Image: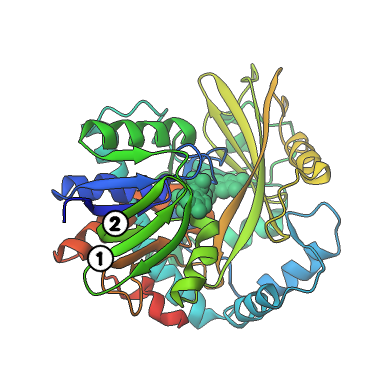
Amino acid sequence: MSDQDDVLIIGGGVIGLCCALALLEAGRGVRVLEAGKTGCGSSHGNCGTITPSHAPPLAAPGMIAQAVRWMLTPDAPLYVKPRIDPALWAWLLRFAGRCNARDCREGTLAKSALLSDSRGRLAAWVRDYAFECAFDESGVDYVYRDGRRFEQDASRRDALREFGIATVIFDAAAYAREEPAMRDGVVAGTIRYPGDASVRPNDYVAELARVVRERGGVIEEGCRVEAISSDANEVVVSTSLGVRRGRDAVLALGAWSPTLARSLRLKLPIQPGKGYSITYSRPQLAPRRPLVLKDVSVCVTTWADGYRLGSTMEFSGYDSTLNRARLDALERGARAYLREPVGPERREEWFGWRPMTYDDVPIIGRAPGHQHLWLATGHGMLGVSMGTGTGQLIADLITGRAPAIDPAPYRAERFQ
Ligand SMILES: Cc1cc2nc3c(=O)[nH]c(=O)nc-3n(C[C@H](O)[C@H](O)[C@H](O)COP(=O)(O)OP(=O)(O)OC[C@H]3O[C@@H](n4cnc5c(N)ncnc54)[C@H](O)[C@@H]3O)c2cc1C
């Protein structure tokens, strides 16, 4: 059939593009269908940290009490907009049901396998394809003002070592010498994760797109997918630019995935977890490496020519307004820690929808009931960190090669 592509990739964010590149490396042909421009979704203004350290899932023991405290604080890092939305409440209930030690361990194992596989592959792609994306391997610092919380988290370092996550601990005095950007006397202690890294995410996505094209992949921008159907031979996709057929297709629509999955009778319990960022020109006294300001849950990333504050988790459906209180909270959080909390020029205010599953584990593998349709979605807070491993896993599964990591924890069957 001459009008059939080899593999259609539905969605041109970091996940779709990583799948495209890994499939090209495996000798397959790809066509990426993207409604806007590549990387215009959640992959654009995120914090760009590559964090194997984030292996423990959001659903953890103690999270419910923490969430209730946050919900009583107007500008807290977590917000659930009160409204009648059965899918959201079912999601929240299931999330609550996973906040126990056993499920948390299971989630950590699943996430750490994919995170550490991805971390190595990212370094290899940056090197092999000469990506210009401000890749920095000097680690990420989690900085604490609350001494009790610092001691508590520092005491878990042995448990993290089991998952291959190394830590370096700094007390207040040692960190004051280490990081001159911090205000005097506010830091109780810091945990550095030397295995973490960072990129400038929009540059990273642009580089992925460049290499996909250079290797013969086709990227169609402005191509909105309207419907998908599949049979024993192929996947047929109706788009704003006409019908596209593929021998296989990968659904990588991030937070938009459930909208198209419904017509395929697939249950994808993904909620958009809205986050915000503000990008500035670089302050003179910028932090030396990316920071997570733990008590306010603000992430700070510095690049040679830019600086970003980001975070917050808001469950307000597909609401596309910029919430001023949330943006202000980012700056207020940074001010509590940093001598120069913002850069001289404010360049962009942004929000993105993280594709959140309630177990905080992505969905990767064959779509149940669809021989040729594959899923690569639900990467939550870690799509940039898990992209390369996801791409490799999808390429291995589609080509029938032995996968580098056990695919079982990511299968969509767990939700059907
Ligand atoms: C504030 C914030 C900070 C973050 N920080 C980090 C971080 O430091 N590290 C990290 O690893 N992760 C981080 N994340 C998470 C990360 O951004 C996401 O996990 C990741 O971008 C998801 O990628 P994706 O390709 O699945 O989705 P997206 O990037 O959203 O891509 C989906 C694509 O599908 C397209 N699309 C939608 N509908 C259609 C349609 N009908 N037809 C065709 N195309 C369509 C969209 O235009 C979009 O380009 C952060 C997120 C936020 C919001």
Q: Which amino acid does label 2 sit on?
A: Arg
Q: How is the image coloured?
A: rainbow
* Residue 69 horizontal/vertical position (percent): 80, 66
The residue nearer to you, when weighing 2 against 217, is: 2
Q: Is the distance from the Cβ of mark 2 to the nearest ligand 1 atom less than 8 Å?
A: no
Per the rendering, the mark at residue 26 is none
Question: At 77% from the left edge and 34% from the top edge, which residue is drawn?
Answer: 335
Total numbered labels placed on residues in the image: 2
Q: Residues within 10 Å of mark 1 (few under 14, many from 20)?
A: many
Say which mark, if any, is on residue 234: 1
Compare marks 2 and 1 and give the one earlier in the sequence. 1
| Residue 1 percent across, percent down from the top left | 16, 56
Does label 1 point to a residue whose CB lies under 8 Å from ligand 1? no
Residues packed near mark 2 inside 10 Å, few (<14), some (14 to 19) or many (20 plus): many
Compared with 15, 39 (above or below) is: above
Residue tagged by mark 2?
245
Q: Tell me if residue 395 comes above or below residue 67 in the rendering.
A: above
Q: Distance between the residues labelled 2 and 1?
A: 7 Å
Judged from the image, the secondary structure of the residue bearing numbered disc 1 is: loop
The answer to the question of whether label 2 and label 1 lie on touching residues, with beta carbons closer than 8 A, is yes
Q: In which quarter of the image is residue 346?
A: top right
* Camera-side residue of 268 and 71: 268
Q: Quadrant of residue 336?
A: top right
Residue 253 is situated, as x and y percent measured from the top left of the image, at: 47, 55
Residue 190 appears in view: no
Q: Residue at coordinates 56% horizontally, 41% vertically from top-left?
A: 46
Q: Position of residue 221 (x, y in %)?
A: 43, 38
The relative height of residue 61 versus residue 277 in the rendered view (above or below) is below
> Which quadrant of the figure contains the C terminus?
bottom left
Horizontal side of 15 relative to 382 (left or right) equals left
